[in-house]
Image (spheres, rainbow, N blue to C red):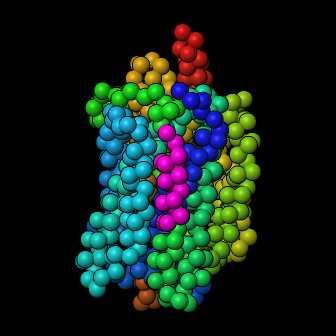
Amino acid sequence: MKKITNKLLWIFAVGQFGWSLLSGIVSNWMVYYYTGTPDAKNPNTGIFASGITQDPVLFKLTLFGLVLAVGRIFDAVTDPLIAGWSDGSNYKGGRRIPFMRAIAVPFALVTIGLFTLPQTGSIVANDTLLFAMLIIFYLFMTIFCTPYNALIAELGDTQEHRINVSTYISFTFIAGQSISFMLPNVAGMLEGAFGQAGSVRLAVAVMATIACIAMLIPSLYIKERDYIDSKPSQTKAFSSLLKTFKNGQFRRFVYSDVIYFFALTLFQTGLAFYETKLMGIEDTWTFPLTATMTLVSVLLYPVVNKLAPRIGKKKLIITGFFTYSLVFLITSVCGQGLYWGFIVAVCAAVPMAILGILPQACVADVAELSRLETGEDRSGMFFAARTFAFKMGQALALVVFTSVTVAQIVNGEEVVQASQYRATAVIATVTCLIGACLFFLYNEKMILSRIEELKKK
């Protein structure tokens, strides 16, 4: 086997930039462009809203919220299926890379389709197309991400490499998410030639092309069999999933993780609205604010990377939870002004650096301990089980956000009031605090000491 180097881990991390960019386009901007109402500062809000059903269809649940939630649930259910397929595969190119290489282009194309195809003259047809395209989007994301995430544990052959690869992919993930916030800026540059809606679609196409290239780089460069001596797992998908959740330390990690992702998704979905509706900032400022948050976060990466082995990932993660809770709380009481945006951006950089790096390393630790204890490598299923759990939290968050922010009739007009957006930030604050408390149950010291003990045998 060839030696795994930090250069190889950086090449691997480029793929995270690609899928993060595609994910960011959908998670950060679909709700913004498909719901809401435009105003003088942000005329692009809800530019596609008239094409789909906006009124609540079940209690206070909107069709759009239900579509997003069902898509996430479908995504969560397919995770263990794809993980089982990947863990049990024996392709010439390896157990992971062939999946990534095959799906990169279709994944990018369906992202473009989400903002293009549901634009017919029929609302029913648009609703149906939106639902179908979103399901396909999440399926393709699962086919790429599940094998990709499994490589985090497999390329992280040492504790140092596990923390390093988690750091690198955190950097490329946040870079992809940050670039996705440039969508209104890119669309603005194109608007004169392509019109309001056309410029948004073309901006999505440009970003999706960049993302596709990024996903293909590790898929084409890394020769998996040269670095990983992997053997197909014989355990069936859902049996493997049940076996994974029987792992006590993994369950303790997941308890807090699913609540954290509920809170974070609630916040991320509302971020563009918090900035435009609560702080009175134009949507073109979203990228500079996100870039500030990213820059500060990246500057903290070396600190997190050095502190994690010294004081432990657990203490840092709990710190990250409490800090994020503070950020959500600040957002819930913020006033108008650009400075509020920068306060939130700088404060959010701290937990973003911590929670962007360390949770993946925790899953890799648990997966490595399981491999040493059982002799069976089910890394794909451990990461799939984690994503299965947190995507259920994300699905619930999407339902909650779109339900809490249903437009109300005020003076004869449908509007979403500021108090509704503030309520979503309060919910995120409370749930993130609960997640912090639950993570105290995770026993990192036992896991690491047991790994070292088994490796010496």
**Viewed as shown, does residue 8 lie left or right of 127?**
right
Residue located 55% across and 15% down the image: 455
Q: How many marks?
A: 0
- Magenta-colored segment: predominant secondary structure: helix
Please name whichever residue, 131 or 53, is drawn nearer the observer in this view of the structure.
131
Measured as percent of width and height from the top left, residue 359 is found at: 56, 40
Q: Is residue 212 magenta?
A: yes
Q: Is residue 210 left or right of residue 386?
A: right
Q: Residue at x 30, y 27 (%)?
A: 234
Query: How far from the left and from the top, in percent, is residue 175?
Result: 62, 57
Residue located 71% across and 62% down the image: 292
**Magenta-highlighted residues:** 208-223
Q: Where 333 falls versus 54 (above or below)?
A: above
Above or below, 418 against 24 in this view is: below
Specify whether residue 201 is in view.
Answer: yes
Q: Quadrant of residue 105?
A: bottom left
**Of 38 and 244, the residue lying toward us:** 244
* Quadrant of the frame with the C terminus: top right
| Quadrant in the picture for residue 281 | bottom right
Q: Residue at x 55, y 19 (%)?
A: 451
Residue 73 versus residue 422: which sits nearer the camera?
Answer: 73
Query: Does 318 lie within the magenta span?
Result: no
In percent of width and height, residue 378 lies at 40, 30
Residue 42 in the figure: left or right of residue 90: right
Q: Position of residue 262 (x, y in %)?
A: 47, 52
In the image, is 156 to the left or to the right of 64? right
Q: Is residue 386 visible?
A: no
